[in-house]
Amino acid sequence: EVTCVNLKAAFVCLQSVVDNFSKTEKTQELVEEIKPALTKVQGLLDIVWARLSLFLTFLCIMENKGQVKQAHEAKIRRDIVNAHAITTLVSTFAAMTLTSKMKDPQFLKQLSTVGILCELEGLLSCYGSELCMLEDMMVAVDDLNFVSFRLVPLKDEDYTPRASLG
């Protein structure tokens, strides 16, 4: 449309300026004369680039509009699976704090250096609907690599557990 006409006009103007000065060999004058035309071409190219970028983004959205819902559902499913895995891990650790192991200095040193050793067992088969459950478990176990506990010494007699990020 108008952008295309302006772009063509800027190129014709630039070409005529270059043709006129290529005969005279005046480099400094050529540079001064071409600067406004180059600035105009640069501005028009920026407009074309922005429109092309918007068009390609629109095409990608239209192409993948059916997959957006699936991606959202997969994220929700992953969040649910991770919530269950983290709850299981926290409950196991809380139960472990009630044992006599928490008074063993060597065990506490192991906790601070290595971390918790967590063994998972699944009694699922890889056939039928249980395959999805196994895949969910694999994702949850992989995501547990990014979970950490931070034990903070008590400052008062408040035994209420507190959860925090970081």
Image (cartoon, helix red, strand yellow):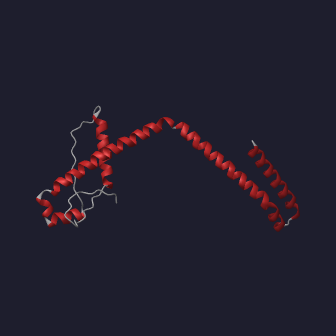
At x 82%, y 62%, the residue is: 33
Residue 131 in the image: x percent, y percent? 30, 36
Q: Quadrant of the C terminus?
A: bottom left
Q: Residue furthest front?
A: 157
Please name whichever residue, 64 or 128, is drawn nearer the observer in this view of the structure. Answer: 64
Residue 45 in the image: x percent, y percent? 70, 51
At x 24%, y 36%, the residue is: 125
**Number of marks:** 0
Relative to 134, residue 166 above or below: below
Relative to 67, residue 154 above or below: below
Q: Residue 18: which quarter of the image?
A: bottom right
Residue 24 placement, left or right of 67: right
Please name whichever residue, 165 or 81, is drawn nearer the observer in this view of the structure. Answer: 165
Residue 154 placement, left or right of 34: left
Q: Residue furthest left?
A: 100
Residue 104 placement, left or right of 50: left
Residue 19 in the image: x percent, y percent? 85, 57
At x 55%, y 37%, the residue is: 62
Relative to 69, residue 19 above or below: below
Please name whichever residue, 127 or 151, is drawn nearer the observer in this view of the structure. Answer: 151
Please name whichever residue, 70 or 141, is drawn nearer the observer in this view of the structure. Answer: 70
Q: Quadrant of the N terminus?
A: top right
At x 81%, y 65%, the residue is: 32
Residue 102 in the image: x percent, y percent? 15, 61
